[in-house]
Image (tube, rainbow, N blue to C red):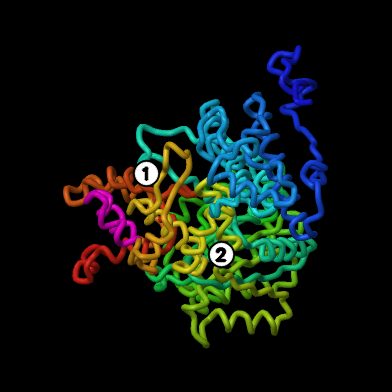
Amino acid sequence: YLSCLFEDDDDEGGEKDGQMGRYLEVELDAANKKTYCCDNGSADNDEMSKHRCHYLLAKLFYELFTQEEFRDDNYPIVGDDCDEPVHKKAKKASLSEREGGVVVSNNYGSDLFSISARMQQLSVPASICRMVQNLLESVSESGAVDAYKTLGEVGKDLHLLLLDPDRFLLDLEEGESPDSMQLRYRKEKLYGRDKEETLITDTFCRVTRGKSEAFFIGGFSGSGKSMLVDTLRVRVKNVGGYVIKHKFDAISQDRPLSGVISAVNQLCLKIKDRLTSQRLAALSKKLKDDFGADIVLLARMLPNVCALSPEFSSLAGEVEDGNTSDKMNARSVSFTLLRFVRLVSSPKRPIMLFLDDLQWADDTALDVVHTFLSDTMGSCVFFVGTYRDNEVQIGHAIFDLLQKLETSNVPTTKSSLTGLDRGDLNKMVSDALGLYPRICKSLSDIVFQKTKGNPFFVLEFIQSLQSRGLLQYDSCQKRWVWSADTIRAEEITDNVLHLLSTKLNQLSNEIQLLLKVMACFGTCTNESVIGYLSESPEYAGVRNGLEGAISEGFVELNAEGSFKFVHDKVREAAYNLTPDRDKKQLH
């Protein structure tokens, strides 16, 4: 029956008509007369049916992947005594071999799992060997934790093998030692936020019809707020829109409007890169006609305006010579920015303004947001604001903005992110380890108890288990292994800052110096700053420190060409490396 699958195809590589693989549809008939030779009751029959199906499926997998015959006398599934349920005969046969009855031993040894070992000898992927072993464990009722309970579980595992073979089907390429193996996190994947992702997408779709809206996302640090917003970037770009972003921090609170102005200044370069020369010329004319002599004022506020047209290049000298600290009150700044936004935004070119960490923003910056959203003369803005809802108190500027938006009849949506539930966290751990979710459950349950499902904390906690040797890669089994009891018995902190601080203290002095310096500059540090500091004897090591910090995964290069911490908590832990008495001097 299976021989046709093993025959060589005439076409090179065994592929026909561009087909990349083959599949076999199988129907397992558990109502086998040899198995059901007498009526032992429906419960026993159901159990016999399950064991029979698991056995047949294991046999099928074995023959498919090894091209060897799986002899029925190789495993305890059918015996001579029809009055005894199959699983009881299997258990009895595992204790002693009976003449004329079921034979436990096989061609590859008397071990119950030697069939799986034989498959490994034939270079069958460890995931398939594991699946066969777990199927046979369920037949023998050996009490193995990973034994399959239902065929539904097998189906879920097969689905993973098909959807992501690189992660779940194929064996990892091992390094020089098991210690060199790395966990494979899906850092780009957003777990457990399907409802929120749909909500923010639907909100943006309404904005493309021509009416501005606001979307607020609350949640603890590390809950995935920024990742949720990032899922929308591609959609915004696909419809012709622009995404501009600013991240507030405690250090920049003395310059409340700089963040919003900086975000709109970014917009100028995005427009230049996106529009054709004809459209840029038309936009430049609109700007000149609308602003008139005030175009110089706009260029002082948004220097990148000069890049939109060769005609504006002459403004660059006036911008440099002018006093950029001219006293403009917040209302004037807000109105000037609004005039610009009106001209460059439309339902076909919506602007998504993303302001992160609003807990550090004040009413001056948020008043500009209100001005944008409440405008009724043509601007098309989708505002997204994220904040740590555990760090804002009643009376914060965020709540004032919400009240003003309600008064102005601006559609507003609010969402709050909590920790991942056990199921979603289990998927996250499963992806990182490349193991079936059912096998990872004992580990993910412990991680859930320690982290309360906070995604960022989950990643840090698993890394701490690996660094302490509590999570190791087993080259023989070709999988990650752990002892749930040992991990529970260990005193492992449930504070993510403490975990990060421990990691940072183990880094080289050059990396620590770089992290301390960057933490004082806020969310981002420009390359020019690193270059300038590296020329001084005191900070000569920051260049090497930067390379090390990137390699260790604490710092990354952002889209604007500056360097930033991968997460707020990393910056906070880095800032805490500096004693309070030295922080003023470092600043």
Dot 1 falls on a residue whose secondary structure is helix
Q: Nearer the viewer, residue 189 or 414?
A: 189
366 vs 466: above or below: below
Q: Which label number is shown at residue 551? A: 1
Q: Residue at x 30, y 45 (%)?
A: 531
Q: Nearer the viewer, residue 205 or 139?
A: 139
Is 509 in the magenta?
yes
Dot 2 falls on a residue whose secondary structure is helix
Q: CA separation, marks 2 and 1?
A: 25 Å
Residue 229 makes an appearance in the image = no
Q: Nearer the viewer, residue 327 or 94?
A: 94
- In the picture provided, is 375 more to the left or to the right than 550? right
Mark toward the start of the polypeptide (2 vs 1):
2
Say which amino acid is labelled 1. Answer: Ser
Q: Residue at x 34, y 64 (%)?
A: 490
Q: Residues within 10 Å of mark 1 (few under 14, many from 20)?
A: few
Residue 223: x and y, percent? 52, 66
Q: Residue at x 67, y 79 (%)?
A: 405
Q: Residue at x 59, y 56 (%)?
A: 190
Q: Which label number is shown at residue 225? A: 2
307 vs 332: above or below: above
Task: Please identify the quadrant where the C terminus is shown.
Answer: bottom left
- In the picture provided, is 247 more to the left or to the right than 106? left
| Image: magenta residue range | 500-519
515 vs 133: above or below: below
Say which amino acid is labelled 2. Answer: Lys
Residue 354: x and y, percent? 58, 63
585 vs 317: above or below: below
- In the picture provided, is 427 more to the left or to the right than 516? right
- The answer to whether marks 2 and 1 mark residues whose Cβ atoms lie closer than 8 Å is no
